[in-house]
Amino acid sequence: MTTLTARIKWVEERTFLGESGSGHSVVMDGAPETGGRDLGVRPMEMMLLGMGGCTAYDVVDILEKSREPVTDIAIEIEGTRAADIPKVFTEIRVRYLITGRGLDPAKVERAVNLSADKYCSASIMMGATANITHDIEIIEAE
């Protein structure tokens, strides 16, 4: 079993400093209309960023282990939240932009599916409340 830690410290108004157990920090803040000063990423945006980082890590790892010539990956995520509290994500659209030389579309799709269904803990947790869809665009490297 792995235990991860985090510490969140209130700075002022709606600004918070998050520090991971590995010693990395991030500023989180709210929008001005909710009392924030727009100094950092919103906490719910952090959820999408975490999910994107998690699946990107998996997909690159799987493609490299499959000896696919991946040269770049970008992930665009759009999440829709419920209108009522708790405003959980109800729909999440994940778009994978995967660049390489002669990538096998079946292997790319397999990597995305393995991440979504088996390896990406963040995607699996978010999938408890959200319908998650995936689009894949393969870009031929120059």
Image: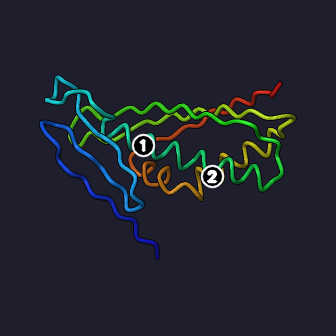
Residue under the image location 66 percent in, 36 percent down? 73
Left or right of residue 55, residue 37 in this image: left
The quadrant in which residue 104 appears is top right
Residue under the image location 12 percent in, 36 percent down? 13
- Report x, y in % for residue 81: 33, 34
Near mark 2 (Cα within 10 A), the count class, few <14, some 14-19 or many ≥20, is many
Residue under the image location 20 percent in, 40 percent down? 85
Earlier along the polypeptide chain: callout 1 or callout 2?
Answer: 2
Q: Is residue 76 above or below residue 124?
A: above
Near mark 1 (Cα within 10 A), the count class, few <14, some 14-19 or many ≥20, is many
- Report x, y in % for residue 41: 33, 35
Q: Pointer 2: what residue?
A: 58
Residue under the image location 22 percent in, 43 percent down? 16
Q: Nearer the viewer, mark 1 or mark 2?
A: 2
Left or right of residue 53, residue 20 in this image: left
- Report x, y in % for residue 122: 47, 52
Viewer-proximal residue among 8 and 77: 8
Instruction: Give the secondary structure at mark 2.
Output: helix
**Which amino acid, by three-letter code, is at mark 2?**
Asp
Left or right of residue 4, residue 109 in this image: right
Q: Pointer 1: what residue?
A: 130
CB-based contact (under 8 Å), mark 1 and mark 2: no
The quadrant in which residue 134 appears is top right
**Which amino acid, by three-letter code, is at mark 1?**
Ala
Viewer-proximal residue among 91 and 26: 26
Q: Is residue 44 above or below residue 65?
A: above
